[in-house]
């Protein structure tokens, strides 16, 4: 079993299309979609493209997906910052009952047996919840209480949009990075698992992607097209920012 892990797509359909082309070329047996398919500029189209893939797929939920379901159901969680509420409302308005039921049905974690790696646990942030922040720099003593409880020897996560591959005690913790809104070098990041762990980055046409996103009515379309896709924030900047919020 060879598995592709794609996380944090955030409605960036052009990035997803590029990654799926690479995945199909690799001939993987399974795709795990690791949450935060939405919110983003092309949410309905992104969901549709994922569902159209003929490779077997497993989905888990991310905090963004969960918040969109809440918004569609008229539930105010109180956890979305004010500056993102317009975006969340717009995304919720693009989706219908079928997408709501789909997103609401995704589990928090899945476990898959991968060639040479054994059982691999996939979660969005940690297996405890979908919002905990940690990075490659987070002290091991902070992480041991979280991951020592996991039965699997390998854990794949996302949420912070930066790839890493590190040990926490006897557990190998791998961050898949972000397909749609990574930090660091521009591109679309994902994982290929089995028999090794391969951190992948797929390049695509950022200019053409920006034009497609500008053609939507997404409230932050210009920011994504002009900044987030071609010129994302650096890892150094985000490591410093996330360091102040880790495991709170």
Image: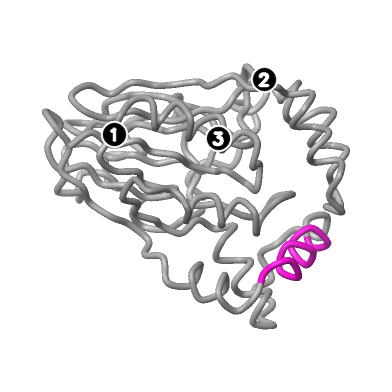
Answer with the quarter of the image where residue 148 lies: top left
Answer with the quarter of the image where residue 93 lies: bottom right
What residue would you read off at disc 2?
Answer: 234
Q: First in sequence: mark 2 or mark 1?
A: 1
Q: Please report the bounds of the magenta region as a residue range.
A: 85-95
Q: CA distance from mark 3 to mark 1?
A: 17 Å
Q: First in sequence: mark 3 or mark 2?
A: 3
Q: CA distance from mark 2 to mark 1?
A: 31 Å
Secondary structure under tag 1 reads loop
Asked if residue 169 lies in the magenta stretch, the reply is: no
What residue would you read off at disc 1?
Answer: 28
- Vertical placement of 231 versus 28: above or below? above
Q: Callout 3 environment at 10 Å: few (<14), some (14 to 19), or many (20+)?
A: many
x, y percent for residue 154: 22, 36
Secondary structure under tag 3 reads loop
Secondary structure under tag 2 reads loop
- Total marks shown come to 3
x, y percent for residue 190: 45, 30
Please give the label number shown on residue 189.
none
Q: Residue at x 83, y 33 (%)?
A: 211
Q: First in sequence: mark 3 or mark 1?
A: 1
Question: In the image as oriented, which residue stretches furthest toward the bottom?
Answer: 74
Q: CA distance from mark 3 to mark 2?
A: 16 Å
- Vertical placement of 188 versus 5: above or below? above
Q: Residue at x 42, y 72 (%)?
A: 105
Judged by its main secondary structure, the magenta piece is helix
Q: Residue at x 56, y 28 (%)?
A: 188
């Amino acid at each position: 079993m060879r598995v592709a892990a794609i996380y944090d797509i955030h409605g960036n359909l052009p990035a997803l299309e590029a990654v799926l082309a690479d995945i199909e070329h690799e001939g993987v047996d399974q795709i795990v979609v690791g949450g935060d398919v939405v919110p983003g500029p092309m949410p309905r189209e992104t969901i549709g493209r994922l569902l159209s893939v003929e490779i077997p797929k497993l989905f888990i939920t991310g905090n963004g997906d969960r918040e969109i379901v809440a918004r569609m159901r008229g539930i105010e969680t109180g956890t979305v910052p004010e500056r993102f509420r317009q975006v969340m409302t717009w995304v919720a308005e693009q989706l219908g009952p079928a997408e709501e039921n789909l997103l609401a049905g995704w589990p928090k974690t899945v476990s898959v047996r991968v060639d040479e790696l054994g059982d691999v646990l996939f979660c969005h942030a940690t297996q405890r919840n979908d919002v905990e922040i940690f990075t490659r720099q987070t002290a091991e003593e902070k992480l041991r209480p979280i991951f020592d409880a996991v039965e699997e020897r390998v854990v794949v996560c996302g949420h912070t949009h930066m790839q890493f591959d590190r040990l926490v005690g006897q557990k190998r913790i791998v961050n898949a990075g972000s397909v749609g809104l990574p930090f660091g070098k521009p591109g679309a990041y994902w994982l290929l698992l089995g028999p090794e762990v391969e951190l992948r980055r797929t390049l695509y046409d950022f200019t053409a992607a920006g034009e497609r996103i500008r053609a939507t009515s997404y409230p932050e379309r210009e920011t994504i097209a002009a900044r987030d896709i071609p010129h994302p924030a650096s890892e150094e900047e985000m490591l410093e920012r996330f360091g102040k919020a880790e495991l709170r």
